[in-house]
Image: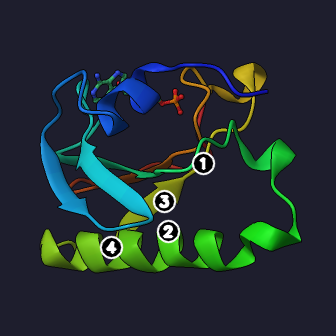
Amino acid sequence: MTGETIFSRIIKGEIPCDEIYSDDKCIAFRDIEPQAPVHILVIPKKTIVNLKEVGAEEQELLGHLLLISAQIAKKEGLEDWRTVINTGAEAGQTVFHLHIHIIGGRKLNWPPG
Ligand code: AMP
């Protein structure tokens, strides 16, 4: 499944975002509806719907996204943080372009809702 999403439009520069990082593989920007003092999304530039459709060929990209998310969290001054990947509507995914949430800056409860 490869459809246009709000994130693919952000990647193309058609919609503005509060960008904080970009490289040849991914872009990171602040969530428009932050759930914590720090709430950043890291997304691949390649169109991937979610983890249901990734194969072994994406191993390097997935590792890159996680490493970048950790670098960003530390750069934001976070000691502790949560990385979340919602996969599918029942899990809370609303934008069907793979993204990692970096959430921190307050005490986070577990289990999530
Ligand atoms: P999810 O529910 O896991 O699919 O997360 C989608 C996230 O994208 C939500 O936290 C939204 O607040 C966020 N979001 C939606 N549109 C935008 C946008 N234009 N810029 C930044 N974040 C957005």
Instruction: Say the numbered circle drawn on residue 85.
Output: 1
Q: Is mark 1 within 8 Å of ligand 1?
A: yes
Q: Nearer the viewer, mark 2 or mark 4?
A: 2
- Residue underneath mark 4: 80
Which amino acid does the dot numbered 2 rest on? Leu
Which amino acid does the dot numbered 3 rest on? Thr
- Residue underneath mark 2: 65
Q: CA distance from mark 4 to mark 1?
A: 17 Å
- CB under 8 Å between callouts 2 and 4? no
- CB under 8 Å between callouts 3 and 1? yes
Residue at the spot 66% in from the left edge and 43% down from the top edge: 48
Q: Say what secondary structure mark 4 lies in.
A: loop
- Residue underneath mark 3: 83
- CB under 8 Å between callouts 2 and 3? no
Q: CA distance from mark 3 to mark 1?
A: 7 Å
Q: Nearer the viewer, mark 3 or mark 4?
A: 3
Q: CA distance from mark 1 to mark 2?
A: 11 Å
Q: Say what secondary structure mark 2 lies in.
A: helix
- Judge by depth and name the residue closer to the eye, 35 or 1: 1
Residue at the spot 49% in from the left edge and 68% down from the top edge: 65
Q: Nearer the viewer, mark 4 or mark 1?
A: 1
Residue at the spot 81% in from the left edge and 54% down from the top edge: 54
Q: Is residue 43 left or right of residue 50?
A: left
Q: CA distance from mark 2 to mark 4?
A: 18 Å
Q: Is mark 4 within 8 Å of ligand 1?
A: no
Number of numbered discs visible in the structure rendering: 4
Q: Position of residue 91 (x, y in %)?
A: 71, 30
Which amino acid does the dot numbered 1 rest on? Ile
